[in-house]
Image (cartoon, rainbow, N blue to C red):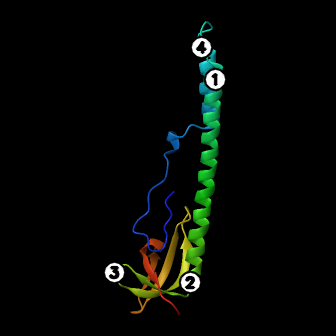
Amino acid sequence: MAIDAIGLAGTADTTIPKNAAVGQDAFLKILLTQLRFQDPMKPVDNQQFIAQLAQFSALEINRQQSEKVDTLLQINATEQAMDLIGRQIELRGGAVGEVTDASFGSNGDARLTVRTQSGAVDPTVRLIDIIRVREGT
């Protein structure tokens, strides 16, 4: 999930294709198939078997931590967007305006409504489009 932030030049796309991850059920199916079709004269080495289980456990913990970090980043972006309401900002291209509203898409991305000094209203400003938050209001 890519999260916008104020003043960043771009965000890295950290999304992982759904078919790229091996879940617990798929891992257990692979493991059981491996055990079912192993050569009885050459069984799987116990150390190798334990190493596979430990590796899968580590991957699952890593996946859970990644989800938690994504949640924290989403909360941070939401707080940034809400904190900007009523504040003067400068956008890429030099436009200056006041944030009047914040809305959030289905994936949690923030869109700010900005009223520029010329009176134009833009409801599609992203956090990444902001280059400076001006002091005072």
Q: Residues within 10 Å of mark 3 (few under 14, many from 20)?
A: few
- In contact (CB < 8 Å): disc 1 and disc 3: no
* Residue designated by label 2: 85
Q: CA distance from mark 4 to mark 2?
A: 63 Å
Give the residue type at disc 3.
Gly
Q: Earlier in the sequence, mark 4 or mark 3?
A: 4
Q: Residues within 10 Å of mark 2 (few under 14, many from 20)?
A: some
Question: At 64% across and 45% down in the image, what residue appears?
Answer: 61
- At mark 4, the secondary structure is loop
Task: Please give the count of numbered marks on the rendered protein.
Answer: 4
Nearer to us of marks 1 and 3 is 1
Q: Is residue 73 above or below residue 14?
A: below
Q: CA distance from mark 2 to mark 1?
A: 58 Å
* Residue designated by label 4: 38
Q: CA distance from mark 4 to mark 3?
A: 64 Å
Nearer to us of marks 2 and 1 is 1
Q: CA distance from mark 3 to mark 2?
A: 21 Å
